[in-house]
Image (cartoon, coloured by chain):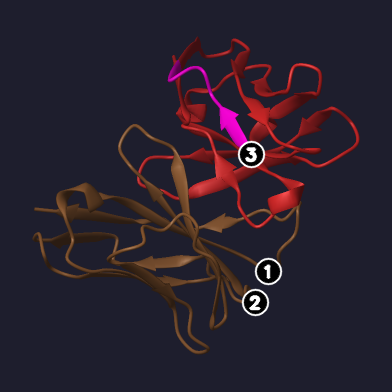
Chain colours: A red, B brown
Amino acid sequence: AQSVAQPEDQVNVAEGNPLTVKCTYSVSGNPYLFWYVQYPNRGLQFLLKYITGDNLVKGSYGFEAEFNKSQTSFHLKKPSALVSDSALYFCAVRDPGDFQKLVFGTGTRLLVSP
Amino acid sequence: NAGVMQNPRHLVRRRGQEARLRCSPMKGHSHVYWYRQLPEEGLKFMVYLQKENIIDESGMPKERFSAEFPKEGPSILRIQQVVRGDSAAYFCASSPSTGNNEKLFFGSGTQLSVL
């Protein structure tokens, strides 16, 4: 069965500094990977996805993610963090053999300080 | 185009009562998913429905929980005889079709509190 792991419960970064939110995955075939963001009292919003092609995927709000097959990772990155980026970030994977389910990680809370 | 609408936003029930959570997918979307988010945990898949059909309910508890998505009207997640452990945020998501690269659109969730 497919799964994702987000090893950090929380990531703290100062505004203007680069940020990385880590995610590793486990699937039986080629993965379909997603990042979502959740602001307080809101539903999840789609940020970006990797299906195939270029390993560096660009998404909304200046975020990007790097797919690394050898390390089975899909880390979320942003060159310069904003205070407004503070939120809960979820990595998700869809197994092509069981594509109807999107499986989420436990989430990483990003706190950007002014 | 309104997004995924869930109601109520907050629902308080006493143990043993029934909880009904509603979800209206985005216009044109015929695929609905329900997820549960427990405190300090990620989202757990519960059930995937298309109009009038349950496609995958592998994440739903076998007892007390049921879901439907009728031909007309919203999708309903029903929890009978609620217990304190059912307290969680329940999110509905929809998509226009199904496929490997299809992203989901989420509602704002229903926060269920069982007293």
Q: Which residues are magenta?
A: A1-10
Q: Position of residue A16 (x, y in %)?
A: 58, 13
Most extreme residue toward the front is B62
Residue B96's spot in the image, x, y percent? Answer: 68, 69
Same subunit under labels 1 and 2? Answer: yes
Chain label for disc 1: B
Q: Is residue B113 above or below residue B43?
A: below
Q: Nearer the viewer, mark 3 or mark 1?
A: 3
Q: Is residue B81 left or right of residue B69?
A: left
Could you say which disc has been placed on residue A2 in the image? 3
| Numbered disc in front, either 3 or 2 | 3
**Residue B43, relative to residue A89: is it above or below?**
below
Q: Residues within 10 Å of mark 3 (few under 14, many from 20)?
A: many
Labels 3 & 2 near each other (Cβ < 8 A): no
Residue density around tag 2, few if under 14, some if 14–19, many if 20 or more, within 10 Å? few
Q: Residue at x 48, y 78 (%)?
A: B69
**Answer yes or no: do the residues labelled 1 and 2 have beta carbons within 8 Å?**
yes
Toward the bottom, the furthest residue is: B72
Q: Distance of mark 3 from mark 1, alpha carbons?
A: 23 Å
**Is A24 colored magenta in this rendering?**
no
Q: Position of residue B63 (x, y in %)?
A: 30, 64
Residue type at mark 3 is Gln
Question: Relative to the observer, which residue lies in front, A113 or B46?
Answer: B46
